[in-house]
Image: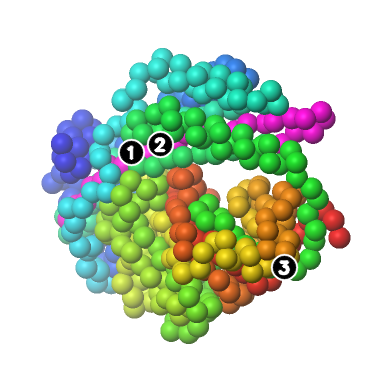
């Protein structure tokens, strides 16, 4: 069944909505507005957590609802309801009409149509029986505990989601998408005497469970989580101070996402609160630095066939060879800035209005071998994995904690470091890039981005990267 047919079945057949009457209510509510849409959503989610050798929690949830938005110049009226009914749409229409009272706008042209699908519409929650999922988590737990006597705790989580959306515009045009999403996480605590350290590894994407539940794949996840934990058991205090930092490929792209990506979103630049405001066409990064946001990658966690306003996603070049080329745009901010939407209007659910958000954001590969980059350093830090971080969008300042990092001495990777953190300024870091590796990698499919209280799945990526001078916060002066 096609995405449109599945969405029609959920929203107009099963829920009992009448399409013609629904379209008429939307058209009347948004008459005189510059833009807007009715967003219909049906979502199923499940979560299984295995801890201390047993199934600790299991949940299954079904949610559905609608959100109606009217946009008049910079003002937005938004109303939502957790019921799919004509009465709920009418109540929402009464609310959003207030934003266009006394305003006479001209409805913006709707998004272009697309038949592209980046992931199969199958519901992953229906693919594996519950008992088999629990059995599998037990097998993963047993394998992890048998790998090394220093393993003290194992936690595994399996998460699945199936989301159906339909966007109806005031001219009656409609777009639909069916979105699967799964994730498998493994966390291991290893101990030696009184010291304990943690390692974790997760994978996921927009597909069924099958790929991630293959034994060779989940065993590799366990092995990686255990490797990290054992590496950290032997870690030494981190020397503090400014020094060259090598970022590893893949997940360290989260630093790029947080410290730079948010500053390239359209709303911050329209309001001139981003460090990148007004810099289109100017050099903002070192030569060789090219950053893109690409929502069109098959089955990736951050990918979408259409965004949550119905715009087809795209590959948007943000920085090309160090020159700022564009911003990430939803429909409203693009219109107000005289630009084109880039397919980055995203929302957490029907209860949220869309915002310009990243999809899969990454830096393209360069031509340097990673080994050569490391050999070029007399002393520095090699950051391979990251935990949490904080960023100030206006200034670009960031602080990130490294969950796996090493000291580089005389061109060689040395001791693992404990308590390393990176402190800097995103725009400044871009200008300090002196080498870009040829080993580009995307993250394994675990990212979630927060903005204005909304969380959405995202992807990040990076090649090995040398930054000449980041302040390293550590545990030793």
- Residue 281 shown left or right of residue 340 in the figure: right
Q: Quadrant of residue 37?
A: bottom left
Tell me how far mark 2 sits from mark 3, CA to CA. 43 Å
* Residue at 20%, 42% in the rendered image: 3
Instruction: Please indicate, yes or no, whether residue 471 appears anywhere in the rendered image.
Output: no
Q: Secondary structure at mark 3?
A: loop
Residue 395 spot, x, y in % from top left: 63, 71
Tell me how far mark 1 sits from mark 3, CA to CA. 44 Å
* Residue at 31%, 25% in the rendered image: 126
Residue 55 spot, x, y in % from top left: 54, 18
Can you identify the residue that label 1 sits on?
207
* Residue at 13%, 46% in the rendered image: 20
User: Which mark is drawn over residue 378?
Assistant: 3
Magenta stretch encompasses residue 186: yes
- Residue 465 shown left or right of residue 26 in the figure: right
Do the CB atoms of the residues marked 1 and 3 lie less than 8 Å apart? no
């Amino acid at each position: 069944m096609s995405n449109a047919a599945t969405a029609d079945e959920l929203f107009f057949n099963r829920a009992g909505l009448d399409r013609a009457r629904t379209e008429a209510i939307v058209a009347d509510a948004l008459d005189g507005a510059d833009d807007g849409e009715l967003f219909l959503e049906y979502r199923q989610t499940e979560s299984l957590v295995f801890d201390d050798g047993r199934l600790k929690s299991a949940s299954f949830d079904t949610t559905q609802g609608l959100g109606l938005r009217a946009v008049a110049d910079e003002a937005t009226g938004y109303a939502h309801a957790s019921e799919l009914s004509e009465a709920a749409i009418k109540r929402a229409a009464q609310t959003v009409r207030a934003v266009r009272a006394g305003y006479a706008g001209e409805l913006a042209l709707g998004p272009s149509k697309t038949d592209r699908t980046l992931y199969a519409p199958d519901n992953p929650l229906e693919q594996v029986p519950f008992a088999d999922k629990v059995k599998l988590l037990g097998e993963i737990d047993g394998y992890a505990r048998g790998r090394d006597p220093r393993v003290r705790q194992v936690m595994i989580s399996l998460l699945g989601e199936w989301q159906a959306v339909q966007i109806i515009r005031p001219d009656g045009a409609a777009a639909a998408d069916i979105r699967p999403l799964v994730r498998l996480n493994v966390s291991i605590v290893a101990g030696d005497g009184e010291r304990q350290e943690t390692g974790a590894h997760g994978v996921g994407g927009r597909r069924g469970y099958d790929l991630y539940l293959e034994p060779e794949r989940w065993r590799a996840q366990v092995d990686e989580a255990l490797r990290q934990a054992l590496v950290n058991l032997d870690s030494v205090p981190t020397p503090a101070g400014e020094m060259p930092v090598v970022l590893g490929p893949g997940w360290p792209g989260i630093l790029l996402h947080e410290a730079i990506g948010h500053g390239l979103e359209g709303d911050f630049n329209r309001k001139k609160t981003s460090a990148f405001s007004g810099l289109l066409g100017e050099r903002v990064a070192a030569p060789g630095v090219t950053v893109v946001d690409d929502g069109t990658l098959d089955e990736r966690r951050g990918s979408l066939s259409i965004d949550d306003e119905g715009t087809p996603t795209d590959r948007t070049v943000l920085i090309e060879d160090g020159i700022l080329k564009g911003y990430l745009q939803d429909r409203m901010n693009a219109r107000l800035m005289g630009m084109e939407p880039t397919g980055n209007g995203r929302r957490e659910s029907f209860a949220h209005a869309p915002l310009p958000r990243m999809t899969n954001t990454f830096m393209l590969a360069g031509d340097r071998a990673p080994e050569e980059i490391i050999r070029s350093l007399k002393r520095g830090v090699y950051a391979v994995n990251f935990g949490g971080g904080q960023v100030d969008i206006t200034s670009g300042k960031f602080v990130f904690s490294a969950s796996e990092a090493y000291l580089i001495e005389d061109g060689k990777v040395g001791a693992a470091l404990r308590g390393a953190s990176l402190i800097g300024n995103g725009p400044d870091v871009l200008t300090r890039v002196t080498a870009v590796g040829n080993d580009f990698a995307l993250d394994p499919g675990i990212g979630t981005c927060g903005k204005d209280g909304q969380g959405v799945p995202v992807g990040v990526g990076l090649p090995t990267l040398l930054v000449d001078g980041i302040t390293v916060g550590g545990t030793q002066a």
